[in-house]
Amino acid sequence: MTFKFGLAHAPLTPFENGRIDYAAYAKILDFHTRHGAEALALPMHAGESVSLTAGERQQLLDFAIQHVAGRIPIVAHVSEAGTEIAASLAAHAKKAGASALIATVPYYWTPPQHMLVEHFEAIGKAGALPFFVLNTPGDMAGVEFPPKSIVELIHKLPNFAGLIDTSLDWQYMIEVVTVARAERADFQFVSGTEYMISASAVGATGLVSSLSSVAPELVRELYDLCRAERYAAARPLQEDAASLFRLMRDGGVSALKAAAALVNRPCGDPRPPLVALHDKDGLYRSMSEAKTFNKEPRGWS
């Protein structure tokens, strides 16, 4: 049971009149498979996972796996507030044909570290697939999955395959790579942001990219250069990616969906309580400051 993270895209979830637009979702999946994705991770937070019911998340995953039909792997995001709910999503993902699982710390709750280890162990066992913890303290009230807990989970869960990190805390990242690979040599460290030069230098071998919905060519080229350790050549691309990343981070899903519409890949408005971004002209001007942006594809081709 192996899964090697490379460049995974995190697709947006399209809505029409508040309901998932599966015709548009098929276009989105096809677009990502044509534009550099080595896997699809879904539905991630960029795909509004927290605004989907458990049933919708299962249906979305089923549809993606059937539509992609083995062209590239599908990684199922199964985070939830309750351990049993997340574990049930993981079991469904295994049955549906997902290649791997991702989960972050429980939403809302801030349990002690030993309970986080138990939470992840239960999810990983229920899914029985390569399992990746998503460390994103900036989104989760500062709750971090520390290196000592990573080591503990390695000992408890044979299919614990790696960590995806969005913290941009280089000291934390170095410590994770050092202690985890001392316990499990093939432990994977994956960047959850497009700050790929620093992450790659630390030891990241994969990337989960939400920016790929807007600038897939930039993300692909940046990733390839970093994997080849051509950091000087990657520097101007990293500057563009960082500029776009900050724009999307500040505006969240609303900015991502507005940006996708600006490049003729409309995905509808975000679901409430999120609101649509109305200053699209200002967003487009800011995006255009990235030198590579005008080279990106328009439409679904």
Image (tube, grey):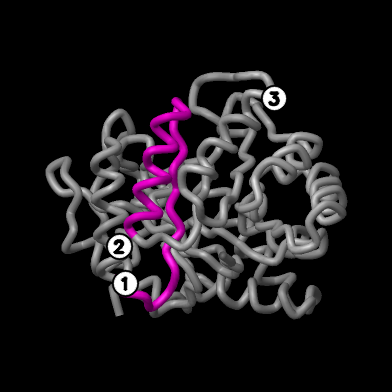
Q: Nearer the viewer, mark 3 or mark 1?
A: 3
* Disc 3 to disc 1, C-alpha distance: 37 Å
38 relative position to 65: left or right:
right
Q: How many marks?
A: 3
Picture residue at 32% right of the left edge, 67% below the top? 29
* Image location of residue 2, percent across then percent down: 59, 66
Q: Secondary structure at mark 2?
A: helix
Q: Which residue is mark 2?
A: 64
- In magenta, the rendered stretch is 68-96
Q: Residues within 10 Å of mark 1 (few under 14, many from 20)?
A: some
179 relative position to 146: left or right:
right
Picture residue at 27% right of the left edge, 31% below the top? 272
Q: Which residue is mark 1?
A: 68
Question: Is 69 covered by the magenta stretch?
Answer: yes
Quarter holding the N terminus is bottom right
Q: Residues within 10 Å of mark 2 (few under 14, many from 20)?
A: many
Q: Secondary structure at mark 3?
A: helix
Q: Nearer the viewer, residue 224 or 286?
A: 224
User: Looking at the image, do the residues carrying marks 3 and 2 touch, with CB atoms under 8 Å apart?
Assistant: no
Q: Which residue is mark 3?
A: 113
* Disc 3 to disc 2, C-alpha distance: 34 Å
Picture residue at 26% right of the left edge, 55% below the top? 267
Quarter holding the C terminus is bottom left
* Image location of residue 268, percent across then percent down: 23, 51
Hey, what amino acid is under mark 2?
Ala
Hey, what amino acid is under mark 1?
Val
Picture residue at 66% right of the left edge, 51% below the top? 158
